[in-house]
Image: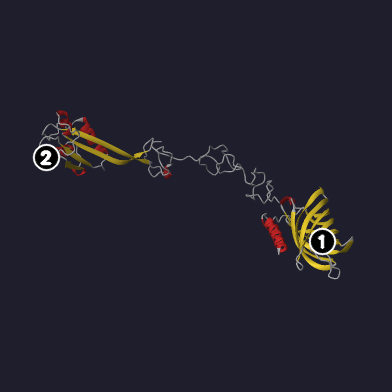
Amino acid sequence: MKQHFKMAALSLAVISSTSAFAQDSSEPAYKNWIGLSGMYYNTDDSRPLALTEGGVYDDGQGITGEYGFRFTQSWAARIEITKLDLDYGSNQEADGEMVGVDALYFLPNDVWYLFGGVKRQAVGESTTLGNIGIGKHWDIHESVKLVTEIATYHDFGEDYNDFSVKVGLAIPFGKSTPSAPRDSDNDGVVDGKDQCPMTPAGVRVDATGCSIDDDNDGVLNSVDQCPNTPAGTRVDATGCAIKVKDSDNDGVEDSKDMCPDTPAGVKVDAKGCTVFDEETVEITLRVLFDNESAVVKMPRDPEISEFAEFMKQYPSTTAVIEGHTSAPGTEAYNMDLSKRRAANFKEVMVDMYGIDGSRLETIGYGESQLLDPAQNAEAHRVNRRISVTVRDTVKVAEEK
């Protein structure tokens, strides 16, 4: 059982090794070989002699002749005949032959080869063996190779394993004579690599067989009348720059410009239209009132004018005008006063500055939101107020 396992494991190792390399179907350096080798052959300790003789075989030696056929760079086969002498007993020998065939797999660059096959051995009794092994053809001379191999054998009937070591010489012959690669258009690039197979005679080509375009404008040197065109320039069929009209000087020609009157200095997209960024804009205003008064004292104050201009510049904005009072007075009175202060400021925005009333909302908070809770004249002064904040997200043209 153990011997079966060893043979199976060795077989699996050889199969795994061969599958780890890509098969090469190219022509081999030689097509055939003949070889002659000496063999050391070691038998399984339990391998018996013929039933009429009794005992077991010992090791032995042999002379092997082989003839090989190499189909591709990777695959080959051979026929092998060995004159084999095996020792047994006291200085006794049994001789016979071992004949068989092997399939060989040569790894890349012939670093070594793996083989497996079937042998028929007739020494004493005839038996059929399966064998696998590894070997190498060492280069001694271009016409002579040194052969080294090690192999293991498994008897299918008696369940024993032998092994052998072989050293000899091989003579390869039948060298491949590959034909010269074809170059149909005579441009110096073989057809297998030529991506432009009909190049006119005399035209300079690159490694792919295509005419060279030194300035990379898409027009080959052979027809390029403007050979030094700057990178990115649009050219005509002769390789010369195409003059285009760009009325607003935004870098997009008129025929493709969807926004023909773009302001100078702004960034545009591929259609010639302004590229915008989003930006948050905001303004806050606070107006103070006299004690118990809802009158806006200085409606033309610069800060109020600036606020109105902001509302006009961003017409989509709306605002909430908040009215407030100081602490003195009843809560009801202060609430009414705060509402009147907010309403009066709205009237100023509508009547004096022309702001649409629908954009303005008013609300009174009375004394509920004091800026300064202290009970002194200064605290009362800052608490008598309206406050309003306008905030919006707007699109702003990007600059070049």
Residue nearest the observer in this picture, 143 or 116: 116
Residue nearest the observer in this picture, 108 or 98: 98
Q: Mark 2: which amino acid?
A: Glu
The answer to whether residue 297 is above or below residue 157 is: above
Residue 387 shows in the view: yes
Kindly give the residue lying farthest to the right in the view shown: 91
Residue nearest the observer in this picture, 257 or 353: 353
Q: Residue at x 68, y 47 (%)?
A: 189
Give the number of the disc on residue 80.
Answer: 1
Residue 274 shows in the view: no
Residue nearest the observer in this picture, 54 or 197: 54
- Marks 1/2: CA distance? 121 Å
Q: Mark 1: which amino acid?
A: Glu
Total labels: the figure holds: 2
Residue 59, given in percent of the width and then of the height, sits at 83, 59
Residue 31, given in percent of the width and then of the height, sits at 78, 56
Please report contact status of discs 1 and 2: CB closer than 8 Å, yes or no: no
Give the number of the disc on residue 331.
Answer: 2
Decide: few, some or many residues near mark 1? Use Cα within 10 Å; few <14, some 14-19, many ≥20: some
Q: Quadrant of residue 287?
A: top left
Q: Is residue 290 left or right of residue 94?
A: left
For mark 2, give the secondary structure: helix
N-terminal of the two: label 1 or label 2? 1
Image quarter (top left, top right, bottom left or bottom right) of the N terminus: bottom right
Q: Residue at x 24, y 38 (%)?
A: 389
Q: Residue at x 73, y 50 (%)?
A: 109
Residue 206, given in percent of the width and then of the height, sits at 64, 44
Q: Quadrant of residue 228?
A: top right
The answer to whether residue 68 is above or below residue 306 is: below
For mark 1, give the secondary structure: strand
